[in-house]
Amino acid sequence: MIDIKLLRQSPQIFIEALEKRNANTELVDKIIELDKEWRKLTTELNNLKAERNSLSKLVAKAKAEKNEELAREIIEKSKKIGEKIKEIETVQQDIESKMKDIALNIPNIPHESVPVGSDETENIEIRRWGEPRKFDFEPKAHWDLGPDLGLMDFERAAKLSGSRFTVMYGYLAKLERALIQFMLDVHTKENGYTEVWVPHLVKRETMTWTGQLPKFEEEAYNIKKDDLFLIPTAEVPLAALHAGETLNEKELPKKYTAYTPCYRREAGSYGKDVRGVIRQHQFDKVELVWITTPERSFDDLEKLTQDAEKILQLLELPYRVVSLCTGDLGFAAAKTYDIEVWLPSYNAYKEISSCSNDTDFQARRANIRYRGKDNKLHYVHTLNGSGLAIGRTLVAIMENYQNPDGSITIPRVLVPYMGVERIP
């Protein structure tokens, strides 16, 4: 959530930030109008409370002088003021609720280092690693290669669940599992993360704390009877682990990783990446989350991004890193790097991880603070990134490591997990 206090002091900061994001600035105007009304009522409320305090003293004086009739008149007047105070407080609470509802729909402020642009065409490439393979045969797309091997089944998945689901058999199913274990091993043993097992169903509050609601409710799977949501990413439970808590600065940063299935309706995205497993309603992911301090959070974002890149380097998959422009930033993000892996079927780089610094946006919603060296309370900064999306990594291996006979070579680092060097 945005800082309401900062918005009161410097509304232009938010107006300019929303303009850079191509977002509606009317929300800021509405909050400012409501805030003016709230301040006006606060002045009236303070005056009424001061008057009531004065009347209390007059009542005491009248009683001391044994003027009961005057005391009753003053008490009656004080009661009416008390009723007026309750009315104003009720109106104020309603205004505060409206302000909060509006604030929940305002995205984070982009960091000054984020390139200004209208959409993904204006993202800036930061670096590349590896060279795309030059095939001496016509490579297959994974949506052909998998079924040809008899290991990837879209038809039976559609029979079971509808479109955008996949069934995998044998070595491809094992490859999915091997990638999960491999990524968790690297992140916990080499990158210093603590592995966490989290619920896949979370409360409405948890989704709101992490910025999923109310913005993306139509894309979420909701169990209406219990009002629980299937997680769209492990970021949701990981970033909310310390909701309502006050941490000690010595504990920070906290680095968490978790493997979970993820569930997204992908509302409004039909027609994009409909073939294969690039955009599915259910997919596996290993997530990385940092809880850190404002002073170091942007340096930590660089480290988190490098941790995600390391997986692709170990798998020897070519990729590039791009800095998202203001118009392409996610709702909660102040800065984001997308890591894009090379996919021969697209003859292009495709996103496999988004690494973001959400600054104090989620922390304000979830009330996660820490006590600093100054003994004062501050909001933490939260960072997140895929480390990596399992399905897309599997696809990248299938397409980049395929052979002329239709088999797939297993990357060297995965051989101990797979027990074979080639599929089939």
Image: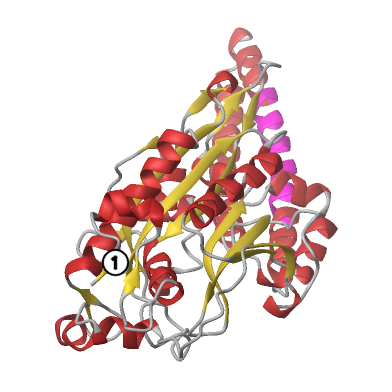
Is 252 placed left or right of 224 in the picture? right
Query: How are the residues colored?
Result: secondary structure
Is 209 placed left or right of 197 in the picture? right
Kindly identify the residue that appears in the image at 77 percent across and 63 percent down.
17
Q: Give residue 233's position: percent from left, percent from top.
A: 40, 58
Residue 221 occupies quadrant? bottom left
Kindly identify the residue that appears in the image at 33 percent across and 88 percent down.
144
Q: Which residue is mark 1?
A: 422
Kindly identify the residue that appears in the image at 38 percent across and 73 percent down.
398
Asked if one can make out residue 330 in the rendered structure from this viewpoint, the answer is no
Q: Give residue 223's position: percent from left, percent from top.
A: 24, 65
> Regarding mark 1 in the picture, which secondary structure is present there?
strand
Camera-nearest residue between 417 and 173: 417
Q: Is residue 43 above or below residue 211?
A: above
Asked if residue 46 lies in the magenta stretch, the reply is yes
- Find the magenta span and give its range: 37-54
Q: Main secondary structure of the magenta part?
A: helix
Q: Is residue 225 above or below residue 122?
A: above
Q: Is residue 102 above or below residue 328?
A: above
Is 234 placed left or right of 293 in the picture? left
Disc 1 marks which amino acid? Arg
Kindly identify the residue that appears in the image at 51 percent across and 64 percent down.
317
Asked if one can make out residue 186 in the rendered structure from this viewpoint, the answer is yes
Going by the picture, which residue comes out furthest to the top? 64
Q: Give residue 363's position: percent from left, percent from top.
A: 56, 42
